[in-house]
Amino acid sequence: MSLVEKCWMVTSKISVIALLMITGIYFGKFVCPYIKKKKGAAAVSIVYITIMLVLYMIPPQIDNFSAYLIGVIAAFLVMYAEDRRNIYQKIFLAITFFSIRWLAVAMAARLDDLVTKALVFRNMGAEKVWLQYGLYVGTRVLDIVLCIAFIAVAIGLINKAYIYKKDEMSVKEMVMLIIPSLVGVTGYGILQYYLMIYERDTGKNLIDTYGFYGALSFLHYLISIVAILVVIVMFQNWKEMQEEQRGQELVLNQISDMKKHIGEVEKLYRDIRSMRHDMGNHIQTLEHLVAHNNMDDATEYLEHLKNEWDEVSPEIKTGSPVIDVILMEKLREAKERQIRFLSDFHYPQNTKLNAFDLSVIMNNALNNCMENVSGDDPYISISSFRKNSIFMITIKNSFGGQLNFGDSDLPETTKSGREHGMGLNNIRRVARMYMGDISLEQGNEEVILSIMMQVE
């Protein structure tokens, strides 16, 4: 074997190894936003690259398609081992990358064929062996660059389009999302099969004989990648519509709660007015009992009046009857569950803060507290203060677990219902209506929710 032939062989191997390593790195970049720990994405890249290099180095025992399939399956198992949540999403990621890898490489190969024919094959001759080698090196570099470009663009667009990365994926959603990838890979397999059959039967290259076949192949690969992206965009738009619908349903539920609170406030006022109306009779009765020195009966009657007053007079007085009712409901619930409930909340008077908006905050925040409070001495406390135009609300509850914040400043929910994760987002939505925001912190077995609003 001559020196130039050895150089051709070494360059071919280096280009294949380089492409394997680069695609492995992009595999990790692709799955990184969906994995809980970043080191899991690095493990995906390392395992994929290692498996593919081992399969490439050993004597050929299996075809390329099966080898890459083994590499993707190994990477999927690493993803699942690192983070066992959302398994259907991980299947979608593995199949999508498998498809994109083949489609991107095939697109680059079609363009590389054109360049190779234009440069390398037109400079054939014994006296131009090193020129041919130099041109071959250039085409290998171009092929790698094109593959990287196609893979990087496809992965970047998919990750940008896939907004709800933390949402649990169902089987139906997975099937819908992987169909374009399966169609793309199947089409690739069929086109390659015809290439192989034609060359075996005729001894000629189908693309050399019918140039349009290469153009149609390239178009199929490009449309397949676009189809993957379009389906993901449509899926995310559908998810966004679902989120909006859930938000509307939640608002309707909160309006219903508000009506109930208003009804209870009206009932409270009716009871108070009734007591005031009867107060004259009560006073006359007490005067009569005292005048006739019936002190025991007077004391008993007075105790009865006191109990009636306690029933209609709220224990918590914030300055807003609606907020009083909300806090009283939570106080009663806390007493039933043996949870300490502490309130030092005061409604800011003479401000633009709407009681309905504040009720949205209170209901969502206190419902979250009631659902998650834990510990040996469970408690919930709420306080507020106002300084100039800034109104701050602090809500605390005991919590013995560990919140998972992931990449967000708000924790990932453990609920799986239709309204999961909507509580804190609705609190933030209302706070931002008043040029404010919220923060959530955990420490010393306590969770602290802080809400800031500008009320003037």
Image (spheres, rainbow, N blue to C red):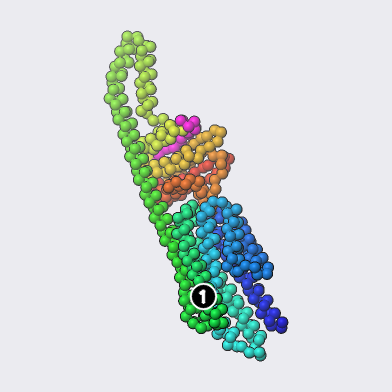
Res 271 → quadrant: top left
Task: Report whether residue 390 is seen.
Answer: no
| Residue 356 inside the magenta-drawn segment | no
Q: Is residue 402 left or right of residue 383?
A: right
View extreme (top): residue:
292
Q: Amino acid at mark 1?
A: Tyr
Estimate the x, y position of residue 369 in percent, counting from the top left: 48, 40
The residue that appears at 61% across and 88% down in the rendered structure is 124
Please name the residue that numbered disc 1 is placed on.
194
Magenta-drawn segment: 335-348
Estimate the x, y position of residue 53 in percent, counting from the top left: 65, 66
Q: Nearer the viewer, residue 384 or 16?
A: 16
The residue that appears at 56% across and 70% down in the rendered structure is 148
Q: Is residue 230 above or below residue 395?
A: below
Q: Nearer the viewer, residue 204 or 218?
A: 204
Q: Nearer the viewer, residue 129 or 200?
A: 200
Estimate the x, y position of residue 448 in percent, counting from the top left: 51, 42
Estimate the x, y position of residue 301 in percent, counting from the top left: 35, 16
Q: Is residue 113 above or below residue 287?
A: below
The residue that appears at 58% across and 60% down in the rendered structure is 73
Res 133 → quadrant: bottom right
Task: Report whether residue 422 is seen.
Answer: yes
Q: How many marks?
A: 1
Crowdedness near tag 1: few (<14), some (14–19) or many (≥20) residues, C-alpha within 10 Å: few
Secondary structure found at label 1: helix
View extreme (front): residue:
201
The residue that appears at 46% across and 43% down in the rendered structure is 392
Quarter containing the N terminus: bottom right
Q: Is residue 365 above or below residue 180?
A: above
